[in-house]
Amino acid sequence: MNNLQSKYEILLEDERLLVDKIEDCEECVEVILEYIAKKADTIHVLTAEEIVSAMHAIGKDLRTELLHVKLERSIVSNKLSGVR
C-alpha cells in the first residue's frame, strides 16, 4: 500500500505541475495575441500566426499529458481504495 500511496502522491504533484504549465502556456498565448492586435499593421501576420499556433500546440500536448496523468491517478486511486 505504501508504494501505491507514494505513486498517488507523485501523480498528484505531476498533475499540479502540468496545470501550472498549461496556465503559463495560455497566458503566453494571450500575450502573443495582444501583441499581434497592437502590431498587426507592422508585423508579418503569417509568422505571428505560426508562433501562436506553436504555443497553442504546446498547450494541447500538455493537456493530453494531463489527461494521461489523471487517468493513471484514477486507476491508482481505485487500487488504493481496494487495499484499505
Image: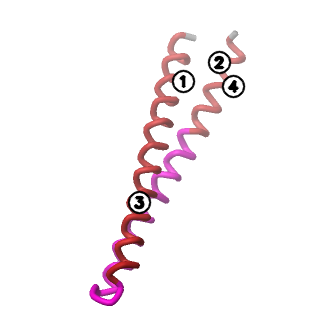
Amino acid found under the numbered disc labelled 4: Asn
Residue at point 72%, 16% (across, down): 82
Q: Are marks 3 and 2 in contact (CB under 8 Å)?
A: no
Residue at point 50%, 30% (across, down): 11
Residue at point 64%, 25% (across, down): 77
Q: CA distance from mark 3 to mark 2?
A: 33 Å
Which residue carries the number 4 mark?
A: 78
Q: Position of residue 20 (x, y in %)?
A: 44, 43
Mark 2 or 1, nearer chain start:
1
Residue 48 covered by magenta stretch: yes
Mark 3 or 2, nearer chain start:
3
Mark 1 or 4, nearer chain start:
1
Amino acid found under the numbered disc labelled 3: Ile
Q: Secondary structure at mark 1?
A: helix
Image check: 58 left or right of 3? left
Mark 4 or 3, nearer chain start:
3
Q: Are marks 2 and 1 in contact (CB under 8 Å)?
A: yes
Q: Position of residue 52 (x, y in %)?
A: 39, 71
Which residue carries the number 2 mark?
A: 80
Q: How many marks?
A: 4
Q: Quadrant of residue 50?
A: bottom left
Within 10 Å of disc 1 (Cα), the crowding (few <14, some 14-19, many 20+) is some
Image check: 59 left or right of 43? right
Look at the image and give the residue range highlighted in magenta: 40-69
Q: Position of residue 54 (x, y in %)?
A: 38, 68
Task: Please say which color scheme the image uses.
Answer: secondary structure
Which residue carries the number 1 mark?
A: 8
Within 10 Å of disc 3 (Cα), the crowding (few <14, some 14-19, many 20+) is some
Q: Is residue 30 above or below residue 37?
A: above
Instruction: Residue 58: give its label.
Output: 3
Q: Secondary structure at mark 2?
A: helix
